[in-house]
Image (cartoon, grey):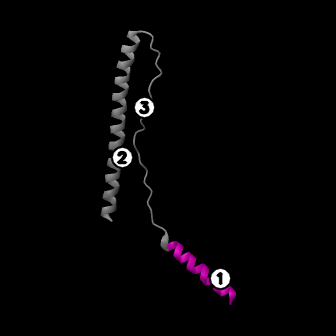
Amino acid sequence: MKKIKIGVISLCLVALLNCSQNNRTLYRLNCVQVPRCEPPRLTIKTNGDLVRSIQQQKQIIKLCELAQRSLQQCINDFNNTIEGKKNDN
């Protein structure tokens, strides 16, 4: 009798476990890798060095903004595609 109780309890636990699991689909996000936006190491000794570093910083900021926008657009496109697949089901 004790073995039957254990068997019934085990069967109920397995059934509950199966009911609680979500059927999740994994998707691979395939976006271009973008470089990290890190400030360069600067050695400023003259006003000319300062001017060059400011120009360099402006260029780095533009590249980082472009990389961020590109990555964000890729993520948004991916999310919209996934939402479309969910709505089709």
| Mark 1: secondary structure | helix
Residue tagged 3: 37
Q: List x then y, in percent, for residue 67.
A: 36, 35
> What is the secondary structure assignment of the residue under circle 3?
loop
CA–CA distance in space, label 1 to label 2: 49 Å
* Residue 75 tag number: 2
Whichever of callouts 3 and 2 sits on the residue coming sooner in the sequence is 3
Residue 15 on the magenta segment: yes
Residue 57 point in image, percent of width and height: 38, 23
Q: Considering the image in quadrants, where does the C terminus appear? A: bottom left
Compared to residue 69, the image places residue 87 above or below, namely: below
The residue that label 1 is drawn on is 6
The 10 Å Cα crowd at callout 3, few under 14, some 14 to 19, many 20 or more, is: few
As shown in the figure, which amino acid type bears the numbered disc 2?
Ile
Position of 35 compared to 69: left or right? right
Image depth: mark 3 or mark 2 in front:
3
| Magenta stretch, residue numbers | 1-18
Q: CA distance from mark 3 to mark 1?
A: 59 Å
Label pair 3/1, CB-CB below 8 angstroms:
no
The spot of residue 44 in percent (x, y) is: 44, 14
- Left or right, residue 17 beside residue 58: right
Residue drawn at (34%, 42%), measured in percent from left and top? 72
Question: Measuring 48% from the left and 74% from the top, which residue is drawn there?
Answer: 19
Which tag, 3 or 1, sits closer to the chain's start? 1
Location of the N terminus by quadrant is bottom right
Secondary structure mostly seen in magenta is: helix
Give the crowd class for mark 2: few <14, some 14-19, many >=20 residues within 10 Å: some
Going by the numbered disc 1, the residue's amino acid type is Ile
Can you say whether 42 is above or below 2 in the image? Answer: above
